[in-house]
Amino acid sequence: MPPSATDGHYEALWPRSPRQSKLKPLAKRLDTLNGKTIAQVWDMVFRGDEVFEFLEEGIKARYPDVKFVSWKQFGSTHGSDERAIVAALPQKFKEAGVDAVISGMGC
């Protein structure tokens, strides 16, 4: 198209596709962590073993009656069997009486 035919205006396409899923409301927030059980989930990529120790220490300082279920109980959420591991998490959380989850991932 010759430059004069555009008159300085060009067609543009929006780079995003239409939304494929509906927005869902967030889960209700816990009123306290005292007496609650928190699961730790990790993809085993970046220093989660260290990070979860610090998180436990800091959370226990504020909420002394909190309990944790270690990331070691759940397996890596990254890798060849991540689909099966992630699919099994809700049942494992239910069995462990989990009230909240901290999910850690590497970068």
Image: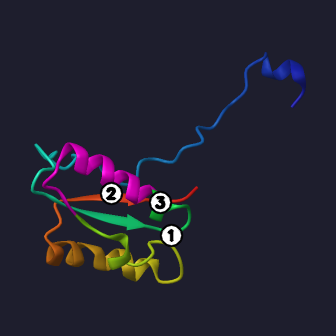
29 up-or-down from 38: above or below:
above
In what quadrant of the picture does the C terminus appear?
A: bottom right
Task: Tell me whether the residue at label 3 lies in contact with that at label 2, contact meaning CB atoms closer than 8 angstroms.
Answer: no
* C-alpha distance separating marks 2 and 1: 14 Å
Q: Residue at x 50, y 72 (%)?
A: 78
Horizontal arrangement in the rendering, residue 22 relative to residue 63 (left or right) = right
Label 2 secondary element: strand
46 up-or-down from 78: above or below:
above
Q: Residue lying furthest right in this view?
A: 2
Where does label 3 land, which residue?
A: 50
Horizontal arrangement in the rendering, residue 29 relative to residue 106 (left or right) = left
Percent x, y of residue 98: 18, 66
Residue neighbourhood size for the residue with mark 1, other residues' Cα within 10 Å, grouped as few (<14), some (14–19), many (≥20): some
Q: Is residue 43 visible?
A: yes
Percent x, y of residue 18: 45, 47
Chief SS of the magenta region: helix
Percent x, y of residue 14: 58, 38
Instruction: Please tell me whether residue 50 belongs to the stretch shown in magenta.
Output: no
Percent x, y of residue 84: 38, 82
In the picture, the disc for residue 44 is: 1
What segment is highlighted magenta in the picture?
A: 51-67
- What amino acid type should be assigned to the residue bearing mark 3? Glu
Q: Earlier in the sequence, mark 3 or mark 2?
A: 3
**Mark 3 or 2: the one toward you:** 3
Between 19 and 64, the one lying in front of the other is: 64
- What amino acid type should be assigned to the residue bearing mark 1? Met
In the picture, the disc for residue 102 is: 2
68 up-or-down from 88: above or below:
above
